[in-house]
Image (spheres, rainbow, N blue to C red):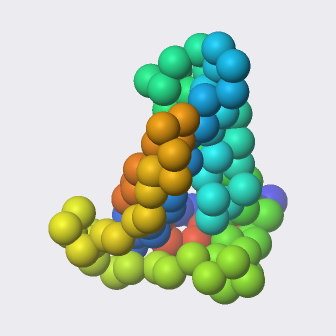
Amino acid sequence: MNIVMTVKKSGYIIVTFKFRREGNKWTALCEELGTSTFGRSIPEAHKKLKEAVLLNLDTLEELGERARFFDKHNINFHSHKPKKNDIKISGPLDTDTYVRAHIYPIPKEARNI
């Protein structure tokens, strides 16, 4: 029997959320992970995207693919929480687009014992 043991948070990643108005809906995309969703407002789309990103990160962890995926997609792992003033993002691209950076805590990879 395998028991999966996780340990406390060991670092952080920075991801970019891009929101774009399309008709009466807002699409939401995490550029680094390729995760997307939509909502009737930015707050609704934001909430849904945060949930989808966490599910995506959990799935990568469960499959043991997190390190490979981060490396392949140039997602930098920070051992200390980055300061918001140090984060640089581009945008908005036009009046229907809103861009925001997020800092996510990432636990050490789970180990089967």
Q: Residue at x 45, y 51 (%)?
A: 92
Does residue 109 appear to the left or right of 23 in the view shown?
left
Identify the residue shown where x is 52% and y is 18%. Answer: 41
How far across and down, in percent of the image, does residue 45 sit? 56, 27
**Residue at the spot 49% in from the left edge and 72% down from the top edge:** 108
Where, quadrant-wise, is the C terminus in this rendering?
A: bottom right
Q: Is residue 63 visible?
A: yes
Compared across the picture, whether 98 is left or right of 33 comes to left
**Number of marks in the rendered image:** 0
Q: Position of residue 1 (x, y in %)?
A: 80, 60
Q: Which quadrant holds residue 14?
A: bottom left
Residue 88 is situated, as x and y percent measured from the top left of the image, at 35, 71
| Relative height, residue 42 to residue 52 (above, below) | above
* Residue 39 spot, x, y in % from top left: 62, 21
Residue at screen point 19% across, 67% down: 85
**Image: 45 above or below 41:** below
Q: Is residue 71 left or right of residue 78?
A: right
Residue 71 found in image quarter? bottom right
Residue 55 appears in view? no
Judging depth in this view, the residue of 34 and 112 nearest the camera is: 34
Nearer to us in this view, 94 or 14: 94
Q: From the viewer's perspective, is 13 left or right of 31?
A: left
